[in-house]
Amino acid sequence: MEEKKEFFSLEKALKRIEEIILLLENPELELEEALSLYEEGMNLINFCEEKLKKARAKVRVILKEKEEYQIETLEKALEIFKNGKK
């Protein structure tokens, strides 16, 4: 696939990973091609992990404390609930 990974959406990257897995299951695949596909797949997996990491950081949670609402990141909200503070 000639498309640069920066222009991939998460969905396109996941679809390409599925394609690569199917190609790698071919027992007649030559070693060099398999290595190339494996490398592409690992790069796409890293790309997806980074996209998901950024998405998690953007998630905001609205917490109600008494009569006031506040917006927190998902990580902060989980920390608040873990420590028993509401």
Image (cartoon, helix red, strand yellow):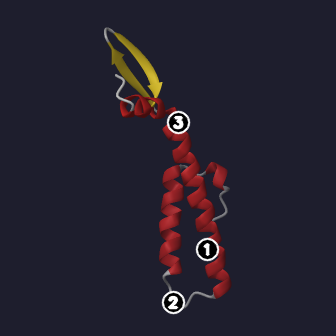
* Viewer-closest of 2 and 74: 74
| Figure label count | 3
Q: Is residue 36 left or right of residue 61?
A: right
Q: Residue at x 34, y 17 (%)?
A: 64
Q: What amino acid type should be assigned to the residue bearing mark 1?
A: Leu
Give the numbered dot on residue 8.
none
Give coordinates of residue 22: x percent, y percent: 47, 76
Q: Earlier in the sequence, mark 2 or mark 1?
A: 2
- In which quadrant of the rendered view does residue 30 lie? bottom right
Q: Is residue 77 left or right of residue 38?
A: left
Q: Earlier in the sequence, mark 3 or mark 1?
A: 1
Q: Residue at x 54, y 44 (%)?
A: 53
Q: Earlier in the sequence, mark 3 or mark 2?
A: 2
Eyeballing the image, is 69 above or below 39?
A: above
Q: Mark 3 against mark 2, which lies toward the viewer?
A: 3
Q: Quadrant of the N terminus?
A: bottom right
Residue density around tag 3, few if under 14, some if 14–19, many if 20 or more, within 10 Å: few
* Residue that carries the numbered disc 3 in the rendered image: 57
Give the Cα distance between marks 3 and 2: 41 Å
Give the numbered dot on residue 27.
2
Q: Residue at x 38, y 22 (%)?
A: 62
Q: Mark 3 against mark 1, which lies toward the viewer?
A: 3
Q: What amino acid type should be assigned to the residue bearing mark 2?
A: Pro
Give the Cα distance between marks 3 and 1: 30 Å
Mark 2 lies on a secondary structure that is loop
Mark 3 lies on a secondary structure that is helix
Mark 1 lies on a secondary structure that is helix
Q: Residue at x 55, y 52 (%)?
A: 49
* Viewer-closest of 67 and 29: 67
* Residue that carries the numbered disc 1 in the rendered image: 37
